Image (spheres, rainbow, N blue to C red):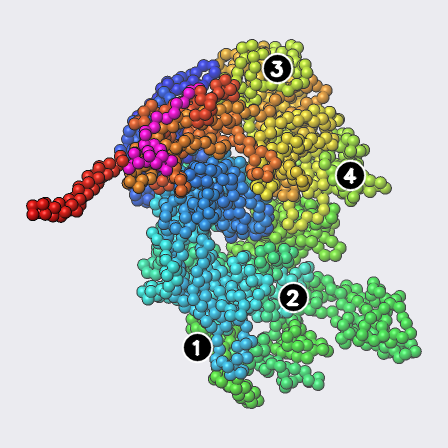
Amino acid sequence: MGRKGSAVPSDFKGQEGALLVQVKSATKLPNRDLLGESDPFVELDVEGIKRQTRVIHSELNPEWNETFTWKRYTPLTDESILLIKVYDYEKILKNKLLGEAVYPLKDLVRIGAQEATVPLRDRDGKVGESRLNLYLEYTKPTLDPDEEMEEAAGVQEEMGMAGADDQEPETEINPGDPTAVVKKKKSAIAAPRSTMDRSKLSTKKQDFQVRVNIHEGRKLMGGNIHPVCNVHVGKQSKHTRVQKSTNKPLWDEVLFFDFNCSALDLCDEPVTIEVLNSRKIRSDSLIGAFKFDLGLVYESTDHQFIHKWVLLTDPEDKESGAKGYVKISISILGPGDKLKIPPKSSSTDDLVDIESNLLRPAGVQLQPATYTVKIYKAEDVPKMDTDYFEGMKRVLRMQHGDHDLVDPYMIVSFAGKKLKTKVMYKTYTPEWDQELNIGVQMPSMCEQLMLRLMDKDHFNRDDIIATHFLQLTRLSSADPDDEGFLPTFGPAYVNFYGSPRESIVDDELEPLNRGCGEGCSFRGRALVELTVSIGQEPSKDELVRDIDSEDLLRVQPFQRRRRFRLFVGFLEGTMIHPVDAPVEFEISIGEYGNKFASTTLPAPSTTQPTNPVYDGSHYYYLPWGMTKPCVMLNSQWEDVMFRIESLNLICRTIDRLEGHLKDVKYLMRAKAPLAESAGKLIKLLDELIIDLNQPLLELPQKNITELDKKMYALRDDEMKRILIEAVNLRENARDIDQAVNEIDTYIYRLQQIATEPQNSIPDVIIWMLCGNRRVAYHRIPSHQVMFSPKQDFCGKLCGHVFSVFLKRPSVPDKSNAKRQWKLPAKLQVFVWMGLEDHAKGIQHKPLDGEISVFAETYENQISLLSKWTTRAMPRPKWSDITGQLKLPKESFTTPPGWRWAGDWFINPNLSLSYDLDSGLSSFQDDVFENQLRTPGSDWPTSRLFWTDVTGEEAQSKEEIMCPIGWEWTDIWTVDLNRAVDEEGYEYCLDQSVGGFVPVEKTYHLCRRRRWVRTRRRNPDLKQQAAHQRMMKAAEEGWEYSRLFTTKFHLKQRTMDMVRRRRWHRKMVADNPDADAIFIIDPTSDTHENKDEVNSSRKESNAVAEKPFLPKVQAPRMFITFKEPHTYQLRAYIYQARDLFSADPSGLSDPYARVVFSRQSQRTKVLNETLCPTWDQTLVFEEVEFYGNPSMLAESPPIVVVELFDYDTVGSDFLGRAIATPIVKLGGEHQMAKLNWHPITRGGEPAGELLGAFELYLNEGAELPFMPPTRQDVYQVPSGIRPVMQLTRIEVLTWGVRHMKKFQLAAVNSPSIEIECGGVVLSTIKIKNAKKNPNFETSSMLFDVFLPVEELYTPPLNIRLLDHRSFGVKPLVGTHMIKSLQEYRRDPVAMVQTIREKMLESGFGDNDYSLDMDFAEPQEATGTQQPQNTSSSGEDGEFKEDVDWWSKYYSSCGNEQLGRVYREKGYENMVVFEEELENYFDMFTDLAQSFPLFHGKRHEDEDLDEDKAVGYFKGTFRVYPLPADGSDPPPRMLKNVPCNQLVEVLVRVYIVKAFELQPQDPNGLSDPYLALKLGRFKVKDRENYVPKNLSPTFGKMFELDGTLPLESELRVQIFDYDLLSGDDLIGETKIDLENRFLSARRGVCGLPKRYYIAGPYKWRDAELPRQILEKWCATQALPPPVWRGNSQVYVNGKTCCLRDYETRGQVHKDWGPPEERLALYTLLDLGLVPEHIETRTLYNPLRPEIPQGKIQMYVDIFPKSSTIPPPINITPRAPQDLELRVIVYNVQDVVLSDTSFTGEKMSDIYVKGWLKGQDKKQKTDVHYRSLNGEGNFNWRFIFPFKYLPAEEVMVIKKKEHFFSLDKHEEKYPVTFAAQIWDNDIFTPDDFLGLLELNLNFMPKANKFAKSVSLDDLPDNEKGKPVPMVSLFDQKNVKGWWPCYEEGGPDQPRELTGKVEMELEILSKEDSEAKPAGKGQEEPNENPHLDPPNRPATSFLWFTSPWKSLRYIIWNNYKWYIIGGLIIILIVAMIGLFIYSAPGALSEKLIAKL
């Protein structure tokens, strides 16, 4: 994407929203290459979009001068950053990081352009001398998104269609070109939190595992806390360990939660993350919490969150702000999911702010919000209480009038909070008018709001009426471009669905009312409104309150109704199973049309009850003939046409796009020519552009909601974006696969906006009723049948004929699956719905038929004394069909706008006229000849009488005539094929009792015999037969039955007691808008019934005391057609594949039943196969359809193909396929093409059917010739069947493996049958599979004719037979290969290609193979001791600080632990993230393992390999043979290795395990290893790792084995238990034989360099050149051709040594050049490199859920070869070190106490410890610090164990006192120092904290004055801080700041400064330099003098004289002196006053 040499591209000026970055140069880059200098290039990353410069070779001061642009639609923000990484390019190895930086774009956004010199950090995070020079420029985009969409200038970015490479210059594009390629703006629909429709999730219960990885916490509120994290998932709770004295805890623990539920239920489980302070009491311990549901995780990529920060808040005080952050990873593992280990946090994670990766939308602050749900009213609420007690109250006069039997109220639930409205008693139309306010924190992770309609019950629990969920993702948008909006809805009606409205008490369908599954019936609707306000949560008084009157008036216009009309014509009703009552269909929309409803007027919503007629094969159909029933419903709904029309426009676009895309994918699958596929793709894009150019319907000016406006803008914006992208794709597409993927994203984005949550018109529901029972239903969304004057805005089904499959109401996981397989019925219907203004003559016009409306009544009679009368009948003489409503002819009055068109006439039900022979082509008549005798007499020949099988009187055989349309095929004969005697008689005592037997006894008085005669249908007389049937039914029109409630029939029988006949009277509408509803007046009756009317009135008045109201009745409606059109269907059923196994043998006997219209036929039965090839054509003659043929061609009727397994009794259902025939009305000559149709069973895939279907109009036009026949069966004609060619299939029959017992016996002598295309190849049986399971002959072949097109290739079947005694050969197992594409080869082309490439490379006859002796590897000789890979002085100059673990860490990408290894220039091995075989095609290049299955496969079973009975090991090669009969090409499977037994040595290296499933109650395990190879077992139980879920093993095991007898290696991890048995955590299985046989050579990985010395010298048993020679031989290739020792020709490629060793320098430990070149060549050929594989562990108890992962590798060496010594991978042992910390002084400590003298002071001491050890030490107390200064001279000593390579501290400790073992934990070496204030009577006060990571600590300051919080690495200013490592410097002394965290939203506070000296000593040094703790002896190294503290530092109550001197005297001396003076003065004055009178008196007396 770069442009060279320009400061600013010429086309950049004026680009709005574009970011330009020019990479100029770099200086002083580090050299990471061992040989030469680095090859640098720069990678730039802006919000995930990366750019890369070219590579400049061997330059440390490169100049690029390349410019890159990012075209943006979203503006940059102050938080935007530019990630910069500079790499050293490596051709083979991974690129090395030279430096990185994070450059903020905040200043660029403000100033627009700038030049920058960016310092680069090295791999350790240190800023070195490297600098990168950049120029940046940015132009802000305009705010109008429409103008942004029009701006099309720029360069092509991220468009994989163009085929441009990122490093190539971009072509210039004219800014004025409207088709220019632009960077795709982030879709508005990509931002919503949910990308999955949860309603489509599986409801099948499965095993799930939720893994919650708690990494760490940051900025937790509080100081000196002991945090612990509690995780609650559903009802399960677990917690982490307690981390002491830190608000930055590092947990790194995994918590496991197991569930057995459906995916739908799992998504609703809540997850709560809580952090608590374990030091506090429980009620006051919560620091913060975060809550969401598992659906948020399940809908994410791979069902997981990786390294997400969650923001903690106080759930009780939402406004208190953030309480901290916790970093988590969550994954959900279901059946078949891959376990992905969260990656370790990189060193750059700390460079990114926490806020940028929070578990919420970026940039949105957590703030309180209120979800306000206004519940106005509801209507059409169903009856929920029984009316028994209500009727009793009315009878007892305790209640007057009728009451609605429901007490509804509404519950609203969201985010775990529930509110409910008040209860409205006794009403179907409640009006609550209440507002419910739910307080939440935004953004909330809950995505659906539940509305539940309830019925109050006073004596039992409240009943659930129905439930509706508002999906908030459909009501809001989280567009990051500031175009999103908060959830909003309505005011609009929501529709409730659930169980049938007639269901009152609890039944099996009650869960439908809870929202589980699809509701089958309308159960009411409610007017609601949703708004969200940000800023505050409601108070308790505001949770539920009444709605203001202003809001009530505001919603009134939204309730305006318009009249809609729904018309449904029933053209066919087929595929009906036998029923015991007439069938009728009901159409309802909402409450309208429900025949059982009592709150709406009756409507012509049901068809006439009709008896199904047998179709002659399997199903029944309804014989409607030329008179098709139809229904018409008038209803009133809100005017939401503007919403429906916009939705239909988008849906039509999606349907057309999906249809065209399906055609393109079919062409791609069929390998059609590229031009044809590309042309179809271009046509697709052209039509898509036309569709997207059509604007949406403008919104009306009134009665629109806020959601309408937002949805309109969202749809319009998204369609414009897709339009621009489609135009660009049309012009720039280069790759069809990528274009198809891009179009798939268009479909997804359109589907996201193709929703309309405010469609208040309910769905149309079709119910099938049998009697009064609801049997099956089908729901049609109303928008799909809605009419619009604009064609593109019509629903896709409106005005069309389509097929409807009814289904039975069911609850997920509770219904019987087999019951659901049977279709209750299939309907062919025509549906139209629209406004009444649009309905005039439109709704049924396409049907080409006439609508007739009839009034209907039934005349009823009863038989009394063998006479038919109307007396004493249980129902009225004239009534409706149910007999509940009295309907005399005189009571009918034409509705307004209608008039009669004729008189009443008898119109019988024609379905009763169909006899037992209906639908059959041949029929056998029978009649019984009966004789009676008296006891002791003979059988008289004259007393004969004739009956049928039930004993009813019948005609004699001579009187039975052949019906019209039939002809006899034989004469009357006695049926002897029964339990009868020689004359055909059977005997009994009494004919009425029955019990006939074939042997005559003397007491038998009755005998009979059966006469039969066969007749067949005469097609020429078919019309006459139909006319006779109609005339017969119309003679009198009576239909008979035993009771009115039983099924009626046409012919009268002896036991019939009632009869009825139907009368019709036609009506004609004068006003098309008039309703056809009859008002029946009971007073308008004949005079003979007036007494009955009066008596009924009196009875009614006595009970209810209310006037007798007239009743209403709806007429019958029919569509009458003139003549049908006759068609012929030809169903070409060629084959099927991958069918279910239904027989115990593991196979099936399949046949197909094809159902079309009223006919059904079946194919022949093919025995014992799962891939049948019928090659059969079924011809359906005289298929009649009514209506215009052009309409039939537009909407062809579907063909249903059902597949069954034939059994003697019954048939098992295998699946059903749906197909659409090609309609040919005449003149079409294009032949139909076979196509694969998916077969489903119970909604799950069940195979595929290859077939085609043609429907011909058969009305005089000449039809194609009938297909040829074979065995009286039509074949698929040659023009349709696939073109065949002779093909050879070579089979490698290697052997069988892992055979289980079959029929309680071992499979010892198996053989294999290979079948394909009808040809079977059998192998020779194995004599004894226990001794050698391989076949003697390993290579076989056979020739077969296969289709040329791979699409039609039949599957290949593998069958395994076991040869047992007495010639018994049971079928043990089968396997089917669907496609042979992966096995197809062209051997002729392969040989020619090799020869041509060899000549092109210049290799000829003068070239030679290098002839030299093969030297054995040095390590292959000598004793086999473990190879020590650590450095030692024994290798001379090789003194390196590296070992095997150095290589491992470097290969894992650990830049810190593998730094020394990389600096020394060694190459990494490959660390595979999955099993090794997944990267090398399962090592099946020679032989594959095909699982064999046996037995009947059930509907809930998958073909899991764990259920296999064994495996066949082999492979296939398929290639065509020459058509001209020339010599076949050479065989491909000729150079296969010997398949004899091989003894091997297997070395298993186990490195470590990850994320093991805990087995102990404490959430941990004590894992140890166990290995099993055949009978050889190893258990390492004594070396278990206590209390660890990610143990490091570092073990090597050697096992002996024999291939293939012991070919499966099992690596198991057990949990050690002291008392009970050890639990298996998980295991993995490795097929050693596949690795041993594979040409990929999986026996020992090849390193990237060939070393003959050093720690990584060659460790294989063979040299590289030997391996190369063998590889060529196994691949049937010529041997390598050498040219010297630096060039070789292999497999059509020339390899040169200089291409691999580009630097020209040879390492001193490298081997000979020819060996090195051979090694490079082998690696290029794809052989297995040196590696570590990561294998997933599984437990047999839960085979589908991963239990952890294990890293390992396996070496396999034949014992016949020289075996090299093993590698030592023992884990590194930690070093014993000692940390000495001397605390000298503290300054500027916060004074937290106040003395009684008022002075601020603190009694300071310092506490220190190593985090993880938690053994704290503290200094003495510096009392009475008045200035924040403390003096200590105190020494801390902390011994610890340290791993230098990993830079961690290893601690072994017991979990608790009673633990038996110490478990090992690793912590960063972090020293924590805290300053405390000592208190005697109260807890000490915490003053400050300092944490120092000794490997990466801030440099100390020399002076206390220069210390500030900016000296910390995570300072708030982001200021870079110089860092040092104590392990490098050994000794550090100086000042550091101490601080106190203020919480996430508060800055840190500097609370003191501490002067310390830290020193690291080894164990030897610490013993040589002893020192005591504190100032104890030995007080040396260094000697610590007592601290020079001021005299004021003392403890007051231990030194009272000092207290008087330094506390009282120093502070109050002047007060004391003044007081004493005052006391002396007062005393003197007192003495004067006291002595003055006496002295005066004495003087006076003396004078006197």
Per the image, the residue denoted by label 1 is 896
10 Å neighbourhood of mark 1: few (<14), some, or many (≥20)?
Answer: some
Q: CA distance from mark 3 to mark 1?
A: 103 Å
Per the image, the residue denoted by label 2 is 579
Q: Which amino acid type is marked by label 2?
A: Val
Picture coordinates of residue 1115 (x, y %)?
52, 74
| Residue for point 77% across, 76% down | 953
Picture coordinates of residue 1098 (x, y %)?
53, 88
- When the figure is inspected, residue 381 is found, relative to residue 1037, above or below; the finding is above
Picture coordinates of residue 1977 (x, y %)?
46, 23
Mark 1 or mark 4, which is nearer the start of the sequence?
1
Q: Which amino acid type is marked by label 4?
A: Val
Q: Which mark is residue 653?
A: none
Looking at the image, is mark 4 or mark 1 nearer the viewer? 4
| Secondary structure category for the residue under label 2 | loop
Q: CA distance from mark 2 to mark 1?
A: 40 Å
Let me know if residue 725 is in the magenta part.
no
